[in-house]
Image (tube, rainbow, N blue to C red):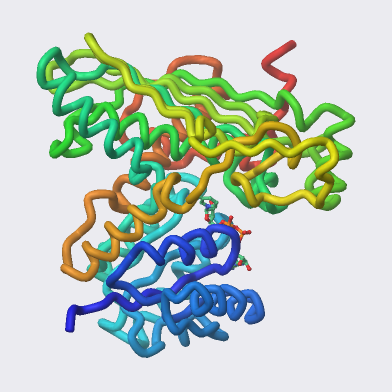
Amino acid sequence: MAKRLGVGFIGSGFITKFHIRSFVAVRDADILGVWSPHIEHARDAAALACEVGVGDARGYESLEALVAAPGIEALWICGPNFARVENIEKLDAAMRKHPGKIKALACEKPLGRNVPEARLLVKFVEHHKLLHGYLEDQLFEPAVVRGREIVWRRGAALTGRPYIARAAEEHSGPHMPWFWQGEMQGGGVLNDMMCHSVEVARYLLTEPGKPRSSITPVKVSASIASVKWSRPEYVEVLKQMMGKDVDYARRPAEDFARATIFYKDELGNPLISEVTTSWSYVGAGLRLSTELLGPEYSMSINTLDTGLKLFFSRNVRGSSGEDLVEKQNAEQGLMPVVPNEAAEYGYEGENRYFTRCFLRDEQPEVSFYDGLAVTELLMAAYKSAEEERTIDLVPGAFDDFVPSVARGEWNPRAAYR
Ligand SMILES: NC(=O)c1ccc[n+]([C@@H]2O[C@H](COP(=O)([O-])OP(=O)(O)OC[C@H]3O[C@@H](n4cnc5c(N)ncnc54)[C@H](O)[C@@H]3O)[C@@H](O)[C@H]2O)c1
């Protein structure tokens, strides 16, 4: 019999359910358990795993019970950002009681809300000698994987390496109140979504087979703004949608962010990554756009340029939903449909990859060290935006830095006086 990986989930919300659905494309893993502070939610997610046929999963009452559960040897951390450190502390206690039981951890983005938190997770896996994977799904988008492979094998090999990568992620705003609260989430859209764009752009600029260190980030220039959600009428809309604790008149977070990250290659040539994210894009739904430019070639991806489109006339009036595309904004007119979102956004490839590495006792290439490096770049971007200047990437420069948005002290109008 081929060996199989027993997987447990910490957290049972939106992303856990996305992962669970994606495991239908992973042939050598079983989801066996879920822990979440609300046992009904854990049981719901476990029931989904059973329903889609990806494991005989159970909801567990405690994190320790999940760690001790028969067959579970790898955990996927998918709790909210504000619970990362608490989850790791509980995991530490549970793993000391059950030494050697868990051999691998995969963690959703962001690894931490700031550099000290991300570093704590790195120290944890080092201390327990665990295999570790940083869950950046977009590196596994089939279009990104295939485009990168062809660009580097043909265009770059014949005419020189690519020099500009662009990545943007935009939608109309996140689904749960804590994402909107700077202190709980760690920031606004920059922290929430630029982590993806930064990593995808870096990945495209890195020669396949070479390590992350083969291109060096040198400096970062960034801006943030609140273009929509701190307008008085939208402050009210947001309160109605997310509850009174999400008050953008008093504690706004940025709903737009852009950054330019300047890298150099091993010969000192400049490489540029331009990234943009927003929670103020009202279109068909989540839009991921990616470009890679080189001396004699270019590639581009837009996840809303789908092969499948539907048209519903004004007489088709139903309830709102997300059955066509994530963060869908309409149910009428001409609309793109992403036929298999779990595959298209990279979750299937991602979970196949980490399962295979963990089963073979191999350390994945996309690791907690990458999660920490991304956090450092995001903190540099916040610092650049706050100080309205380009920031040099000096090691250790962000070890004590917490963005003003995450401290609840950001004034979006200050830069416009
Ligand atoms: N890769 C992506 O594109 C992507 C997309 C969405 C979310 N995420 C990340 O996944 C994580 C979860 O986001 P989500 O959208 O599922 O959020 P969510 O709010 O939908 O779900 C969070 C889950 O965690 C549970 N929870 C609450 N307190 C907890 C605690 N102390 N410990 C453990 N679990 C707790 C909640 O009950 C809920 O089940 C976040 O870190 C987020 O940034 C990644």
Q: Is residue 21 visible?
A: yes
Q: Nearer the viewer, residue 128 or 317?
A: 317
Residue, x 51% and y 30% (percent of image)?
305
Q: Is residue 118 visible?
A: no
Residue, x 33% and y 86% (percent of image)?
71
Q: Quadrant of residue 297?
A: top left
Q: Nearer the viewer, residue 134 or 113?
A: 134
Q: Nearer the viewer, residue 47 or 24?
A: 24
Residue 343 on image: x %, y %: 42, 51
Residue 140 on image: x %, y %: 34, 46
- Residue 397 lies left or right of residue 281; in this view the side is left
Quarter of the image for the N terminus: give it.
bottom left
Q: In this rendering, is residue 300 above or below 74?
A: above
Residue 348 on image: x %, y %: 38, 56
Q: In this rendering, is residue 399 above or below 72?
A: above
Tally the marks.
0
- Residue 109 lies left or right of residue 251; in this view the side is left
Residue, x 76% and y 32% (percent of image)?
229
